[in-house]
Amino acid sequence: SLKKSDSKNNNKLYQSDFDRLLLETGNGSFERLKNQKNYRIGVNYMDTDFKKLIQEAKKIAYKKTLSEYAVCGQVGCALLTKKGNIYTGICIDANCALGNCAEYAAIAEMLKNSESEIDKIVAYSAKGKIYAPCGRCRELIRMINNLNLETKIMVDEDKIYKLKDLLPEMYITKNTMA
């Protein structure tokens, strides 16, 4: 694979799968490539894992009316675990702020199968857009497994971040669950 070094700030650009699209800095966080004009990761360039996750989320992302008070499925989520399994979920929206995000449903499915470490995750709307997880979902991803700070999250068609970069000021409290 092709590898270039940027001697100015010692960053490396890797030409392989996921890494060829992102600039890895010395502290391990990822940033969009800034030095290329009109650069977009786009669906044609993203790694095969994210392509598969988007396909899985698209399959389930369509609005279903449950009653006059509730709908579901406007957003579908697919996640890939470190063990290589894919889990999916849909959102539920109801009056009075009841319901849950698609990420919560996918995470619950994963937890039912005794897994908690997420490698990659994406949420896709019935409107054809990729959505970033809300703050509540970001915190849940972090709280179920400390290693999930390294989870790669697609927040837009051309943006992928690690969870730790989306949670610069994490919620931290004493463990009241033990």
Image (spheres, rainbow, N blue to C red):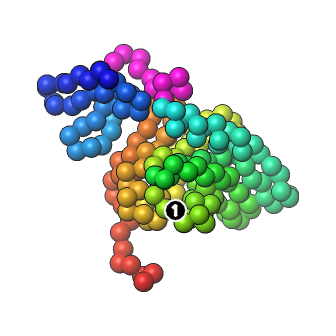
Going by the image, does 37 lie left or right of 50?
A: left
Whether 138 is drawn above or below 41: the answer is below
Q: What is the x, y in percent for residue 148?
A: 41, 56
From what the image shows, is residue 7 above or below residue 164?
A: above
- Residue 21, picture quadrant: top left
- Vertical arrangement, residue 157 with respect to residue 97, above or below: above
The x, y position of residue 23, in whole percent, is: 30, 31
Quarter of the figure with the N terminus: top left
Judge the density around disc 1: few (<14), some (14-19), many (≥20) Cα neighbours within 10 Å. some
Q: Is residue 48 magenta?
A: no
Q: Residue at x 39, y 46 (%)?
A: 162
Most distant residue in the right direction: 67
Q: Amino acid at mark 1?
A: Glu
- For the magenta stretch, what is the residue range? 33-46
Which residue occupies 74% across, 62% down?
95
Q: Quadrant of residue 129?
A: top right
Q: Residue furthest left?
A: 8
- Give the residue displayed 49% in from the left and 40% down from the top: 154
Magenta-colored stretch includes residue 45: yes
Q: Is residue 32 left or right of residue 120?
A: left
Q: What's the residue at 41%, 17% (across, down)?
A: 38
Say which residue label 1 marks.
115
Magenta segment, principal secondary structure? Answer: loop
Check disc 1 and report its element: helix, strand or loop. loop
For residue 78, side relative to residue 169 (left or right): right
Q: Quadrant of the C terminus?
A: bottom left
Residue 78 seen from this side:
yes
Q: Percent x, y for residue 69? A: 81, 60
Can residue 104 be seen at all in this image of the molecule?
no
